[in-house]
Amino acid sequence: MTYVVTETCIRCKYTDCVDVCPVDCFREGPNFLVIDPDECIDCTLCVAECPVEAIYAEDDVPDDQRQFTALNAELSKLWKPIIERKPAPPDADEWKDVPGKLRHLQR
């Protein structure tokens, strides 16, 4: 089992999770983070660190977010690793509770 970053992260991209990952499995896109399922060791540390509760165990991803399992796998092969915490986008707090953000995902 791996962990999956879901829609809530889009346009928020808080990187608190990156600081606690012991294997550097996070990948960074323009406005979203993903977890490389081949690198994730299922340690659960990132779940508690995510301020917007965007990270789920693969088996616990909500039904309306299931497409993010495949999206994490796909984008983790294209995006570069992020190994250090960075400041969130200036408008991250404005986006954290906005539903239906998939259309805003930048690849």
Image (cartoon, rainbow, N blue to C red):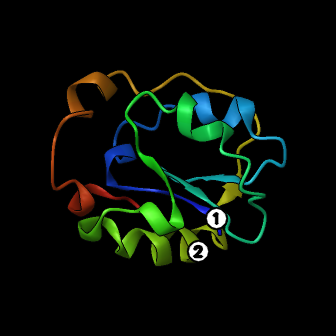
Earlier along the polypeptide chain: callout 2 or callout 1?
1
Give the residue at x 63% y 62%: 79
Decide: marks 2, 1 in contact (CB < 8 A)?
A: no
Q: Residue 60 at what x, y percent from top left?
A: 43, 61
Q: Is residue 76 left or right of residue 50?
A: right
Identify which residue, 57 or 13, lies in the foreground.
Answer: 57
Tell me if I can see residue 31 in this picture.
no
Give the residue at x 56% y 29%: 49
Q: Write down the residue under mark 1.
A: 2
Tell me if I can see residue 86 in this picture.
yes
Q: Write down the residue under mark 2.
A: 73
Q: Residue 12 at what x, y percent from top left?
A: 37, 36
**Three-letter code for the amino acid on which mark 1 is drawn:** Thr
**Three-letter code for the amino acid on which mark 2 is drawn:** Ala
Q: Residue 99 at what x, y percent from top left?
A: 15, 48
Identify the element where label 2 is drawn.
helix
